[in-house]
Amino acid sequence: MKLDEFLRLNAPEELAALTLAISKASITVWDNIPFKSGLLAGVNPSGETQKAIDVFSNDVFVETLAATGCAAEVASEEMAEPAEAKGTVSVAMDPLDGSSNVETNNPLGSIFGFYSGKLPTSGRNLLGSLYVTYGSMLTITLSFGKGVHRFVAVREGAAMNFELLGVNLRLPEKPEVYGIGGSRRDWIPPVGRFVDSLEERGLRVRYCGTFVGDYNQVLSRGGMFAYPQLAKKPKGKLRILFETAPIAFLNEQAGGYGSDGRQNLLDIAPSELSETSPAYIGSAQLVRELEKAVTEG
Ligand code: AFP
């Protein structure tokens, strides 16, 4: 089944139009990665170096989303203020996740949250979310609150179309992998101890430095991804609105749980667009164990 057919049958009209626009724009981004790798652009609102592909992806997605007439505003990790538009759905995005991995040819991603109401707002106001993976395949993994579904881009003549690859994806019962950001020496002690217990249980480390790439490992094999509070970054690194809330929404639809170490990530109401929080996302039983370890200190 093609993506447009699936969306016509399974998504509200606005979310269908926004998702279809993202699917087309993601092919443009995919085609331009080789030509924009390595070129620096500027600094984003979080003070991180912007690559040319960060800015290119941002502009392609903002333009395409606004042109649907369904986006009320488009907020981005790469912009200080949202782009205003005429629709009803507020879109928050990380247009190119993992750009420091372009040169190393590791997976890259784009993350989108579809929110009701003005941004910033909590993940409880998510209507749906999706992420694009630029990896060995170009895929879109999405949820509109009724399960998690995946599509893969296939070339048909000159055209690239997204075809259904998997429906109702669920985290496997038995967790196999974990990936933790930051350096071990900067982790808070409960996280170090928890990772020791994961190793004792035979879980293997899988960490490529792209949130989307690392979360794909967890969704396929069970386990946990985390970017914890660090000695120098008590509020972690990942942005709630653009990165962790959209993935936590999707992860919950796959039977998992997402936490900042003390509460459900979806319950956090950020007051700033680029507000960050610690993030622990994956198999519910593991993340709840971690939450207990962090709370007990
Ligand atoms: P970049 O977009 O700057 O490459 O950062 C990627 C990211 O936001 C997220 O995708 C990773 O999980 C995390 O940062 C990697 O951070 P570390 O390099 O500190 O482990």
Image (spheres, rainbow, N blue to C red):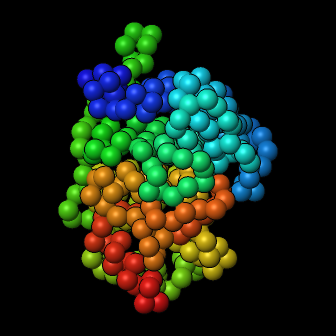
Q: Is residue 219 above or below residue 90?
A: below
Q: Is residue 64 above or below residue 250?
A: above
Taking 40 as reference, is 209 left or right? left
At horizontal 60% and vertical 50% (from top left) the residue drawn is 119
Q: Is residue 9 above or below residue 261?
A: above
Instruction: Decide which of 108, 15 is in the foreground and name it.
Output: 15
Taking 253 as reference, is 189 left or right? right
Taking 287 as reference, is 9 left or right? left
Instruction: Decide which of 31, 295 is in the foreground and name it.
Output: 295
Instruction: Decide which of 248, 43 is in the foreground and name it.
Output: 248
Examine the image and state in which quarter residue 203 appears.
Answer: bottom left
Residue 206 percent across, percent down from the top left = 41, 60
At horizontal 64% and vertical 62% (from top left) the residue drawn is 271
Instruction: Answer whether residue 85 is visible to the viewer in this image.
Output: yes
At horizontal 75% and vertical 56% (from top left) the residue drawn is 47
Q: Is residue 93 above or below residue 34?
A: below
- How many discs appear? 0
